[in-house]
Image (cartoon, rainbow, N blue to C red):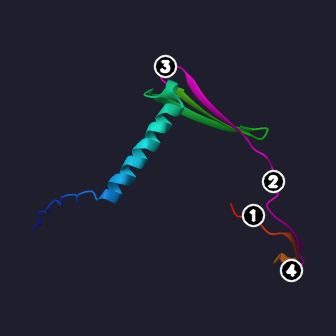
Amino acid sequence: MIKKRRSRKAAPMTKERKKIQKKIERTYDKLRNKYPEIRGKVVDFVQQSVSDGIVYVGIRFTDKTVFSLRYGCDMLIVGADYLDAKTGDYEVIREYMKPIPH
């Protein structure tokens, strides 16, 4: 015998939830206006690549236009240490710089 599942009604929105929802909607409106030329277009495909330290993302639309983003990557040291590798455990002899959390 299969039991019929009763549907639950959504709880009414509290003032706090309404405030959060309005903030989300304002944020989305700002994002929609950031690149107005691409709003409402249909994506054909997305391509990405990395070359000479530049990350490229291209979004191709069905009307044969492309929206591209290019990010420059700087190489930053994230840690420096002197290790003993004789045993294969790579024991730290000296830590010159603590790793930077990402």
Badge 3 or badge 1: first in the primary sequence = 3
Residue 5 to residue 25: above or below? below
**Which quarter of the figure is the N terminus placed in?**
bottom left
| Labels 1 & 4 near each other (Cβ < 8 A) | no
SS under mark 2? loop
Marking on residue 100 = 1
| Labels 3 & 1 near each other (Cβ < 8 A) | no
Comparing 18 with 38, the one in front is 18
On the image, numbered disc 2 is attached to which residue? Answer: 76
| Labels 1 & 2 near each other (Cβ < 8 A) | yes
SS under mark 3? loop
Q: Which amino acid does label 1 sit on?
A: Ile
The Cα–Cα distance between marks 3 and 1, rounded to whole angstroms, is 44 Å
Q: Residue furthest left?
A: 1
Left or right side of 32 for 11? left
Badge 4 or badge 2: first in the primary sequence = 2
Badge 4 or badge 3: first in the primary sequence = 3
The Cα–Cα distance between marks 4 and 2, rounded to whole angstroms, is 30 Å
Tell me the crowding category of disc 4: few under 14, some 14 to 19, or many 20 or more residues within 10 angstroms, Cα based: few
Residue at 37% across, 47% down = 22
Circle 1 or circle 4, nearest the eye: 1
| Whole-percent x, y for residue 61 in the image | 50, 25
Q: Is residue 85 magenta?
A: yes
Residue at 11% across, 66% down = 3
Q: Does the magenta stretch include residue 74?
A: yes
Q: Which amino acid does label 4 sit on?
A: Thr
The part of the chain drawn in magenta is 61-86
On the image, numbered disc 3 is attached to which residue? Answer: 63
On the image, numbered disc 4 is attached to which residue? Answer: 87
Q: Which amino acid does label 3 sit on?
A: Asp
